[in-house]
Image (tube, rainbow, N blue to C red):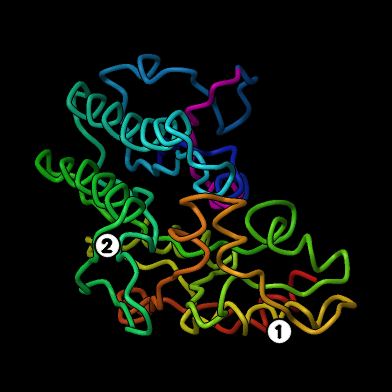
């Protein structure tokens, strides 16, 4: 296939591109930095560099500033929104300009789409509860779904917290553990929907090939855990004191709105659509995933 990727040099994009190239696909990556073209791989700094008569089989849209990287100032909120909505709108413009739009759009989203719903188990057909992250995900998905008007198969990818070494959320979450302190936020009963990065890559490749599948897919492991259970499992790989809580008021003081949106609340999300489609997880349980990582 001839593929176009945004976010192709990021935490998920880097191993995904390696897998796609190994499978024989040709990849064009939208990147802010100029890079040398390689066999089966090229970089463009603008979508204007994609010719109107160019044939693209599919687009994988993973662009987006991290929600957990910085305090949510007005400026950073704008960056989070522009990186998601702006990039998706630019892709829609490209689709309309192409002589023939791609057959498939796999577009990023997150489990924040559902909002905060306590212990309720959330599959793809669950309703949403409003909040900032929820609204951003919903707007992101709504923009991507407009590609369907051009005959494009659209699959929003509702990602959980992606775990692996070499960066990502786990690097931040394990910092206190490396100092001998096993910690979790607030009461610890909030749900933590996670997925190993290898399963993210495999799921994207699975959906790329399955032309019969469309609509949203939860990219989360089948067994979500609570924040406290995650701390207990992670502690097995470090020498730490017993798990302790960072009180909610302290978390809010340090992190502002992000604390309530991402850390003190969570979603109990299950990958119903992937499982029903026959996808098999390599790491369905947290202990397996952490053992592979560490």
- Please provide the residue range marked out in magenta: 18-33
Up-down relation of residue 167 to residue 79 (above or below): below
Q: Which mark is residue 69?
A: none
Q: Secondary structure at mark 2?
A: loop
142 sits left or right of 112 in the view: left
53 sits left or right of 239 in the view: left
The residue labelled by disc 1 is: 232
Crowd band around label 1 with a 10 angstrom C-alpha radius: few (<14), some (14–19), many (20+): some
The residue labelled by disc 2 is: 216
Residue 176 in the image: x percent, y percent? 79, 64
Of tags 1 and 2, the one toward the viewer is: 1
Residue 101 in the image: x percent, y percent? 21, 34
Q: Quadrant of the N terminus?
A: top left
Q: Quadrant of the C terminus?
A: bottom right
Residue 148 in the image: x percent, y percent? 14, 46
| Residue at the spot 59% in from the left edge and 37% down from the top edge | 9
């Amino acid at each position: 296939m001839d593929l176009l990727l945004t976010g192709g040099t990021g935490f998920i994009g880097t191993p995904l591109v390696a897998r796609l190239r190994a499978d024989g696909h040709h990849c064009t990556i939208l990147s802010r930095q100029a890079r040398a073209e390689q066999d089966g791989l090229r970089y463009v700094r603008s979508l204007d560099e994609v010719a109107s008569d160019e044939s693209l089989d599919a687009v994988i849209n993973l662009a987006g500033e991290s929600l957990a990287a910085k305090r949510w100032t007005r400026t950073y909120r704008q960056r989070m929104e522009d990186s998601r909505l702006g990039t998706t709108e630019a892709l829609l413009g490209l689709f309309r300009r192409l002589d023939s739009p791609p057959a498939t759009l796999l577009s990023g989203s997150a489990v924040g789409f559902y909002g905060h719903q306590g212990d309720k188990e959330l599959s793809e057909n669950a309703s949403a509860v409003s909040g900032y992250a929820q609204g951003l995900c919903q707007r992101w998905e709504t923009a991507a779904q407009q590609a369907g008007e051009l005959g494009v198969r659209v699959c929003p990818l509702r990602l959980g917290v992606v775990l692996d070494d070499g960066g990502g959320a786990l690097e931040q979450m394990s910092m206190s553990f490396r100092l001998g302190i096993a910690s979790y936020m607030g009461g610890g009963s909030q749900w933590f929907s996670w997925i190993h990065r290898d399963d993210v890559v495999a799921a994207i490749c699975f959906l790329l090939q399955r032309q019969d599948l469309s609509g949203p897919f939860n990219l989360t492991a089948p067994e979500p855990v609570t924040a406290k259970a995650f701390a207990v499992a992670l502690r097995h790989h470090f020498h730490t004191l017993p798990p302790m809580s960072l009180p909610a008021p302290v978390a809010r003081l340090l992190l502002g709105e992000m604390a309530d949106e991402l850390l003190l609340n969570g979603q109990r999300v299950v990958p119903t659509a992937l499982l029903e489609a026959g996808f098999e997880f390599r790491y369905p349980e947290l202990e397996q995933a952490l053992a592979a990582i560490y």
